[in-house]
Image (tube, rainbow, N blue to C red):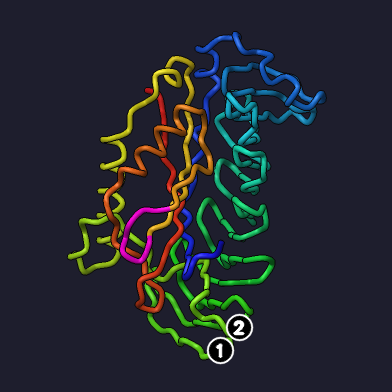
Amino acid sequence: MKMNHIVYCFLAIFLASCSAAKIAQIGNVYQNRYKDKIPATETIILGTYQYVSSQTQDGSYKLRVFYPEKFQCTAENTYSDKNLKTKNGPFVSWTDKGKISVKGQYENDEKSGEWLSYNFDTGALYLKTNYTNGKINGLQESFDDGILRSSYTYLNNERNGPFTVYDSLGNVYNQGQYKDDLIIEQTLEENDNPNPDEEEFKIVELMPMFSGCEEIEDYKVRKTCAQNLMLRHIYSNVKYPARARERDVEGTAVIRFVVDKEGYITEIVAIKGVQEDIEKEALRVVREMPKWHPGTQGGVPVKVQFNLPIKFRLE
């Protein structure tokens, strides 16, 4: 079912990697738990309830992360060192149901080159992003059913330069210029879309924000304030599940939800659960979030689909 004026915000999803030292502390109780999931050409170094580290024939190292109860690999990182300190090489992540989610490349522990993200529901490509030294630089393009829906120019993680937004028929809907992540000029185009109310966008001009900072005039200061309030709310309410703690399970759960035109949180679903109890706890925390300040497109409040990472890390 399509939602009117859906726009997508994708926060960076950070994989909570487990170092070799951390793995060593856990021991070899689960050494062969995922043996049949590892290619025969690789040598398993150590296995835990959640992780498997291995060495490949070319001398690089792999760290695979699993959703333990589903025996589903959710991430595969490539490292140049046995201690798993420096990411070098391909990265792939999957949803908890086994669909590819993200793939890209690391160089010297930083995202590099083209990264591709795929739709959680359909598996189709929805986002193409270019990175240099870990920062978004150049074009970021979004797609819907193979149709280009938006194109934004980035410089060091901020929108700087020309952008174009297309409607569902591929016609130009909006275009203009950004500077320091703020629109400095734009032109809304007339088009022949027969169903303008069914329009969907991949990138929103002003993102929805956690409530409490609306009176701050400076956009960047307001955005930082809202993010800090959101994080404070989440991590003051989240409780580390006992079973996950006992089995040394760590990771970043990703919860998808919609911020509607009034700012209410709706349509909550787990994209990456990490582990059963962690998934339930992350969903609970999001369900209990207060009302947000809605996002806008062309100055009009719109529905925004939001991906929120919640990190579970044992100290």
* In-image side of 296 versus 63 (left or right): left
Neighbour tally class for label 1: few under 14, some 14-19, many 20 plus, Cα within 10 Å: some
Q: In the figure, residue 80 lies in which quadrant?
A: top right
Provide the residue designation for mark 2: 171
Q: How crowded is mark 2: few (under 14 residues within 10 Å), some or many (20 or more)?
A: some
Tell me residue 248's x, y (percent): 47, 19
Q: Quadrant of the N terminus?
A: bottom right
* Amino acid type, residue under disc 2 in the picture: Asn
Which SS type dominates the magenta stretch?
A: loop
- Judging by the rendered image, the residue that carries numbered circle 1 is 191
Residue drawn 43% across the image and 84% down it: 186
**At label 1, which amino acid type do we have?**
Asn
Q: Are marks 2 and 1 in contact (CB under 8 Å)?
A: yes
Q: Against 191, is 51 above or below?
A: above
Q: What is the span of residues highlighted in magenta in the rendered image? A: 260-266
Secondary structure under tag 1 reads loop
Q: Find the distance from the CA under tag 2 to the CA under tag 1.
A: 7 Å
Q: Which residue is drawn at 25% across and 54% down?
A: 225
277 relative position to 288: left or right: right
